[in-house]
Image: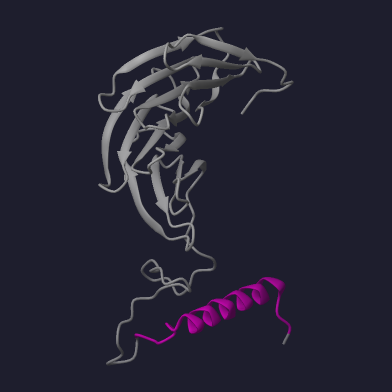
Amino acid sequence: MILKRESLVALCFFCLCASHARKSGFAQSVDRPGAAIVKRTDNYGDPLPEGAVARLGTVRLRQPFASCVAFSPDGKVLASGGADKRVILWDPATGKELRSFIGHSHSINALAFSMDGKLLASGSQGSEIRLWQVAMRQELRRMNHLSPVTTVAFSPDHILVASGGQDNAVRVWEVDSGKQLRCFQQEHGNYIHVVAFSPDGKLLAAARSNKKVDLWDVATWKPAGSLEGHKENVT
């Protein structure tokens, strides 16, 4: 008997799924009278949808259209955010989802952990900045950048959080109150790619789409210089 190529492919796929199910230990039929109903899982121990026989691959470390990631300072947690409007925390050693934060109404563009790992900041296309308490699994505070957020960063002492957006503005917020302390806005059309505090917390840097890096003295909030030399945008 000669099988058509489509039939052969379908047969191979069926055999592969059956083999996968047997290896997972869940090939027992539930159609026989008295047979135990077994909750099926994949090779990683994660449950399968109802009616599914096997999963090729894994759901671990998977997020639709993920656009940003950030490690906790101790490297034990990986955060990701994306177009599904969720912030997901993962165990990078196993790839297993630990928890998720839901609340944003638009896709998430930026993530940052505080240096002590207790707080996580997320910035969205909908202009929101949300601060999350990692251990408590709840939202602490939210702020409005007034423009899609492209970057967020905590000061080393986690007293401040800075944000940058498509409105070419760098905004500095007080974590405890959510109050905006400063706004630096220059050169219309040059949106902010990234913000960062120096390790000692004395300087704040912002890279704009004009290929410049601007610096501010955190103690006085006065300009501390502008760095030029990049031929392309600093990201």
Is 139 positioned to the left or the right of 15 in the image?
A: left
Find residue 42 and report its horizontal and vertical position in percent. 45, 72
Color style of the picture = one colour
Question: Magenta stretch?
Answer: 2-30
Query: Does 174 lie within the magenta span?
Result: no
State the residue in front, 60 or 47: 60
Q: How many marks?
A: 0
Measuring 50% from the left and 64% from the top, which residue is drawn there? 58
Please tell me in which quadrant of the rendered image residue 115 appears.
Answer: top left
Placement of the C terminus among the 4 image quadrants: top right
Find residue 54 and report its horizontal and vertical position in percent. 48, 73
Up-down: is 160 above or below 135?
A: above
Please tell me in which quadrant of the rendered image residue 189 appears.
Answer: top right
State the residue in front, 57 or 149: 149
Query: Does 22 lie within the magenta span?
Result: yes
Measuring 36% from the left and 32% from the top, which residue is drawn there? 158
Find residue 24 and report its horizontal and vertical position in percent. 47, 80
Measuring 49% from the left and 84% from the top, which residue is drawn there? 22
Find residue 210 and report its horizontal and vertical position in percent. 64, 15
Up-down: is 149 above or below 46?
A: above
Placement of the N terminus among the 4 image quadrants: bottom right
The chief SS type of the magenta part is helix
